[in-house]
Image (tube, grey):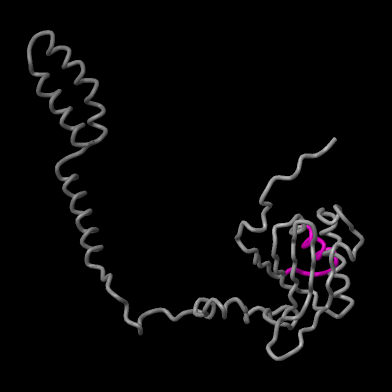
Amino acid sequence: MLRSFLSKCTLTTCSAATTGTLGKLLDASLQVQQPCCAGLRFSSQSTGLIGLETDKRYEVKRSQAFGPIPLAESTPKTVLTSLSTPEYAKRRHMVFDGVPYHKLPVCEIQARWNNTIVKIRDDLKKGEDVKRYCRVSCRTVGFFHAKKKTELAGEAVGQAAAERARQNNCHPHVRVIIKGIGPGRNPTMRGLLRGGMTVVSITDTTPITNYSLPQRPRKIRRV
């Protein structure tokens, strides 16, 4: 772009030497373009310096070693990044009120289309009986028939489950595992918070299938 602009300026200066009315017009245009060229103040020396600077930068980048770094010079891995995925899922570095993360109780939420079930238990251990704190559904709280698939029922189930678990000496920090896409997904967690629980993590284990969806349209409503 700069080269084309300078070539235009030189062409106008060369053509300004012509005689006649055309030469006068070119002289007038040259007077207008001269201040613009004077403000740029480019010379062969300056353009040469710019080229040398770019060449030096290119050589510096080219001289850098992009080969494999020796093991002795590499930075050691931190505790979090060096763990595998199953080990990191346990989060042994996180502690809540003296209890590590992998030993916190688990709250299972089954959000179905027409019902919401909440179970709170201890972490599964091989060879030991798992302590179950409570199991609450919409029916045990007092919602029947079509009222079970409402957000109000889901929130009431979460609050009742949290209160019953606290009465059975459950830890206030729980890990939530949600399964299903029913209307009581989010309201149940709000109910847990209202009941005095603190949600540490949320894990969604909903299977990605089409079998749980309705396979045919609903029947026509009779009026």
Percent x, y of residue 71: 35, 83
Q: Quadrant of residue 44?
A: top left
Closest to the observer: 214 or 20? 214
Q: Main secondary structure of the magenta part?
A: helix
- Residue 189 within the segment the image draws in magenta: yes
- In-image side of 21 versus 119 (left or right): left
Q: Quadrant of residue 10?
A: top left
- In-image side of 18 versus 40 (left or right): left
Percent x, y of residue 58: 22, 58
Percent x, y of residue 106: 73, 75
Residue at the image point whose x is 23% and y is 24% from the top: 33
- Residue 196 within the segment the image draws in magenta: yes
Start-end of magenta stretch: 187-199
Q: Residue placed farthest to the right in the image?
A: 142
- The answer to whether 100 is drawn above or below residue 144 in the figure is below
Percent x, y of residue 187: 78, 58
- The answer to whether 41 is drawn above or below residue 211 in the figure is above
- The answer to whether 64 is drawn above or below residue 105 in the figure is above
- The answer to whether 16 is drawn above or below residue 214 in the figure is above
Residue at the image point whose x is 16% and y is 16% from the top: 26
Q: Quadrant of residue 14?
A: top left
